[in-house]
Every structure is written in structure tokens, then in C-alpha cells.
Image (cartoon, grey):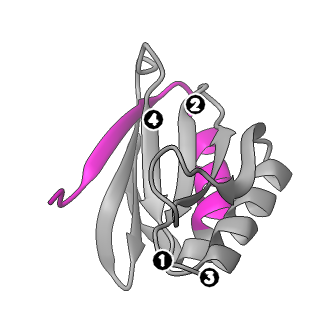
């Protein structure tokens, strides 16, 4: 099980604004920031870090677990409103398993950001 992950981004301000808005439905809040680092947390536990530097190339895929399908839908809407680009509207992805409900957006640096719920409706 992962404890936390860090992502290098080309513009820390833009990335912070995008991820705070996109991940808000999943319970993420700003935990701390200093110099060119931003930590995002759920319930006070920082597990997603952004660092301004060279953009991570090639773009990567990061999936965030959602507690229910409604939160996947809310993530998708919030991410698009925050400037993300559609990379797969919310829906069942039976190729993974019958209850895999996910949504995908491309963030500011082109990373494929997903929210996923594995539970039945």
C-alpha cells in the first residue's frame, strides 16, 4: 500500500489550483506549502505532494479512490471546471471489473488523473 506520492509540475500555482478544485469532492484540502512544494491531505493525512520543477515526462496516470460513484461524478465536473481536459467521462469500465466506475481528466501538465469507485451502486 502506498503512503504518499509526489509529482513534479511545471507551474506550482496552476497545479495547486487545479488539484485543490478537482480533488475537493474526494475530501482533499491544502495541508501545507513551502518554497515550491504543496501537500494535499484528506483528514489531515498528506498523501499527495506537488513540487515545481521539471515537468514529469512522460505524463503519468494517478487514480484517486472515491467512496461512491457520486463522488466520481463530482470529481469529473470539478476537474473540468478547473481547466482539466476530458479523457473519459464517468462510467463503468467492465474491462477492469464489473463495478469499476471511473472518470479521467488530463491535468495542467497532461497527466491522466482519475477518480475511481470499485463498489456496486
Classify residue 107 by image quadrant.
Answer: top right
Q: In the drawing, does residue 21 fall left or right of residue 95?
A: right
Q: CA distance from mark 1 to mark 2?
A: 35 Å
Is residue 12 shown in magenta?
yes
Classify residue 78 by image quadrant.
Answer: bottom right
Q: CA distance from mark 4 to mark 1?
A: 21 Å
Q: Nearer the viewer, mark 4 or mark 3?
A: 3
Q: Is residue 59 above or below residue 25?
A: above
Q: Are marks 1 and 3 in contact (CB under 8 Å)?
A: yes
Residue 104 is at least partly visible in this image: yes
In the depicted view, which residue is nearer to us: 112 or 46?
A: 112
- Tell me the quarter of the image containing the C terminus: bottom right
Q: Position of residue 60 (x, y in %)?
A: 43, 28
Q: Which mark is residue 119?
A: 1
As helix, strand or loop, the secondary structure at mark 4 comes to strand
Q: What residue did someone put label 3 on?
A: 121
Q: In the drawing, does residue 32 fall left or right of residue 94?
A: left
Residue at the spot x=39%, y=71% of the render? 41
Q: Which mark is residue 61?
A: 4
Magenta segment: 1-23
Q: Which mark is residue 108?
A: none
- Tell me the quarter of the image containing the N terminus: bottom left
Q: Which mark is residue 11?
A: 2
Of the image marks 4 and 2, the number of the one nearer the N terminus: 2
Amino acid at each position: 500500500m502506498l503512503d504518499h506520492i509526489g509529482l513534479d509540475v511545471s507551474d506550482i500555482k496552476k497545479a495547486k489550483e487545479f488539484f485543490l478544485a478537482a480533488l475537493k469532492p474526494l475530501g482533499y484540502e491544502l495541508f501545507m506549502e513551502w518554497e515550491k512544494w504543496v501537500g494535499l491531505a484528506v483528514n489531515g493525512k498528506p498523501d499527495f505532494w506537488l513540487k515545481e520543477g521539471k515537468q514529469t515526462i512522460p505524463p503519468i496516470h494517478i487514480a484517486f479512490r472515491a467512496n461512491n460513484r457520486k463522488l466520481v461524478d463530482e470529481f469529473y465536473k470539478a476537474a473540468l471546471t478547473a481547466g482539466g481536459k476530458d479523457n473519459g467521462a464517468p462510467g463503468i469500465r467492465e474491462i477492469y471489473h464489473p463495478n469499476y466506475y471511473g472518470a479521467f481528466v488530463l491535468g495542467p501538465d497532461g497527466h491522466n488523473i482519475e477518480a475511481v469507485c470499485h463498489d456496486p451502486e
